[in-house]
Image: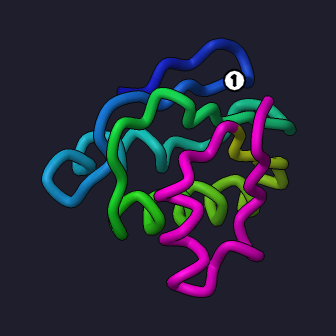
Amino acid sequence: MIQREGEHLRVSGQLTMDTIGALFAEAMLPPEGKSWTVDLAQVEAADSAAVSMLLSWLRSAQRHDAKLTFVNVPDNLRSLADLYGVADALPLSQSS
């Protein structure tokens, strides 16, 4: 689930291949501002689909000249980004 609060997005639940379909479409909506923070603290589970969604979200932000930062990234999601060699491409912060 994604909750929008101004330029702050809060993502919760499971970000897996089985659950990400609707979230992925919502994540592709163009950013409305110039600086976005995506809080992942309430993500319960993540797999490679979550990494793909974050990368797509980042590309969408870049196309709209927006800055995007992911905060409170769960360790397992950070590990997956490292495993796939994309952690350096993603603006991952430990906390907000």
Estimate the x, y position of residue 23 in percent, counting from the top left: 34, 41
Provide residue 57's location: percent of width, then percent of height: 57, 55
Residue 77: percent from left, percent from top: 50, 58
Q: Splitting the image into 4 quarters, where does residue 5 fall? A: top right
- Picture quarter with the N terminus: top left
Q: Residue furthest left?
A: 18
66 vs 42: above or below:
below
Could you tell me what secondary structure mostly forms the magenta stretch? Answer: loop
The residue at which mark 1 appears reads as 8
Quadrant where the C terminus lies? top right
> Tag 1's secondary structure?
strand
Vertical position of residue 87 compared to residue 1: above or below: below
Residues drawn in magenta: 72-96
Across the whole image, how many numbered discs are drawn on residues?
1
Q: Is residue 4 above or below residue 1?
A: above
Whether residue 19 sits left or right of residue 34 in the image: it is left
Residue furthest front in the image: 75
What residue lies at 74% left-to-right and 55% top-to-bottom? 92
